[in-house]
């Protein structure tokens, strides 16, 4: 048995869960309710795999990264990843020593260098990570992962809201646009979002005039701002009952985040925020077939 214990956001948790599925037939999820994740597993999904506590004999998978298995490695050359960089073996050794001093088994995160760190610190030493590589991911690995994403069963009442809105709003002319402003990380807001906003506008300016944009964001200001610039008829968004900026504060907010993610998965072209696992997870849930432009 392997138990997914990732405690990050929605995208991180789903990716960790899917990795556990691929690593073991008996995959479980320990979906811990936290201040940033008030929704329980059962409020979002109907899969019968949630555990309230972690069995003492179970392995755990606590990474936000998709696991790269030994059978995947022939398809992925060293230095493959463009997101982050490998950690020097000396630094990795220090990391293992630190974990042992903390009383944690050094192989607890066997596909990780450092757990719970983004980008560089969590990259494999050989940089054979596939996270946020989208269409660069070798086809055999996409085919290996896709069936596990398909096993995720969203609660029927949530899926009904997705189906109802998508039926009249999502078609082949719609481009998914996911904008993470990094509202909760001021350093990343300055480093990633400010320059990314300019790149996004260039992407939107260079598409056909009949294209429409389905906008998802962690800010309530993004869709209205883009609608002012590109026209209200071309910029659409799901009519949420919760504020995007405060979605992490309630189970209803997380539910509507999941709706946004599933609607994003219905688009076949995607403008995705760099480093955001929200759009990445949507891409996988859509079958890993959409064309992606990361900005």
Image (cartoon, grey):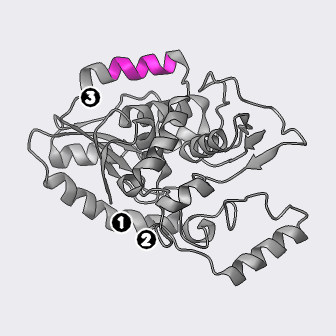
Query: Who is closer to the viewer here, 34 or 86?
Result: 86
The tally of labels here is 3
Coordinates of residue 156 in the picture (x, y in percent): 52, 16
Query: Who is closer to the viewer here, 286 or 249?
Result: 286
Visible residue check, residue 68: no
Is residue 159 a member of the stretch shown in magenta?
yes
Q: Secondary structure at mark 2?
A: helix
Vertical side of 235 occupied by 171: above or below: above
Residue 194, numbered label: 1
- What is the chief secondary structure element of the magenta stretch? helix
Coordinates of residue 141 in the picture (x, y in percent): 48, 49
Mark 2 neighbour density, 10 Å: few (under 14) some (14–19) many (20 or more): few
Location of mark 3 (residue)? 170
Coordinates of residue 64 in the picture (x, y in percent): 61, 52
**Mark before the other along the chain sequence, 1 or 3:** 3
| Distance from Cα at disc 2 to Cα at disc 1 | 7 Å
Q: Secondary structure at mark 3?
A: loop
**Where, by quadrant of the figure, is residue 259 drawn?**
top left
- For the residues labelled 2 and 1, say whether their Cβ atoms are less than 8 Å apart: yes
Coordinates of residue 49 in the picture (x, y in percent): 71, 28
Mark 3 neighbour density, 10 Å: few (under 14) some (14–19) many (20 or more): many
Q: Which residues are magenta?
A: 157-165
Query: Who is closer to the viewer here, 105 or 243?
Result: 105
Vertical side of 94 occupied by 257: above or below: above
Vertical side of 161 occupied by 60: above or below: below
Residue 191, numbered label: 2
Residue 98, numbered label: none
Q: Quadrant of the C terminus?
A: bottom left
| Distance from Cα at disc 1 to Cα at disc 3 | 28 Å
Mark 1 neighbour density, 10 Å: few (under 14) some (14–19) many (20 or more): few
**Mark before the other along the chain sequence, 3 or 2:** 3
């Amino acid at each position: 048995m392997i138990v997914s214990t990732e405690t990050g956001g929605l995208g991180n948790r789903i990716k960790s869960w899917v990795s556990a599925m691929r690593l073991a037939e008996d995959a479980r999820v320990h979906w811990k309710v936290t201040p940033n994740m008030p929704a329980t597993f059962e409020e979002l999904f109907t899969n019968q795999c949630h555990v309230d506590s972690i069995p003492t004999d179970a392995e755990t998978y606590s990474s936000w990264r998709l696991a790269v298995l030994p059978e995947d490695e022939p398809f992925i050359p060293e230095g493959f990843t463009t997101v982050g960089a490998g950690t020097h073996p000396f630094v990795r050794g220090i990391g293992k020593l630190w974990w042992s001093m903390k009383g944690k088994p050094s192989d607890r995160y066997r596909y990780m260098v450092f757990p719970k760190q983004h980008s560089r610190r969590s990259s494999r030493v050989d940089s054979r990570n596939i996270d946020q590589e989208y269409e660069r991911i070798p086809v055999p690995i996409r085919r290996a992962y896709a069936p596990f994403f398909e096993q995720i069963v969203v609660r029927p009442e949530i899926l009904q809201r997705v189906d109802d809105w998508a039926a009249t709003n999502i078609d082949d002319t719609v481009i998914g646009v996911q904008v993470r402003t990094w509202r909760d990380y001021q350093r990343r807001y300055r480093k990633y979002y400010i320059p990314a906003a300019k790149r996004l506008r260039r992407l939107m300016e260079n598409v056909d005039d009949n294209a429409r944009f389905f906008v998802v964001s962690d800010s309530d200001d993004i869709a209205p701002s883009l609608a002012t610039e590109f026209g209200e008829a071309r910029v659409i968004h799901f009519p949420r009952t919760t504020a995007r900026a405060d979605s992490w504060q309630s189970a209803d907010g997380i539910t509507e985040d999941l709706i946004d993610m599933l609607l994003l998965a219905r688009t076949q072209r995607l403008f995705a925020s760099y480093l955001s696992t929200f759009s990445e997870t949507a891409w996988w849930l859509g079958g890993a077939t959409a064309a992606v432009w990361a900005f």
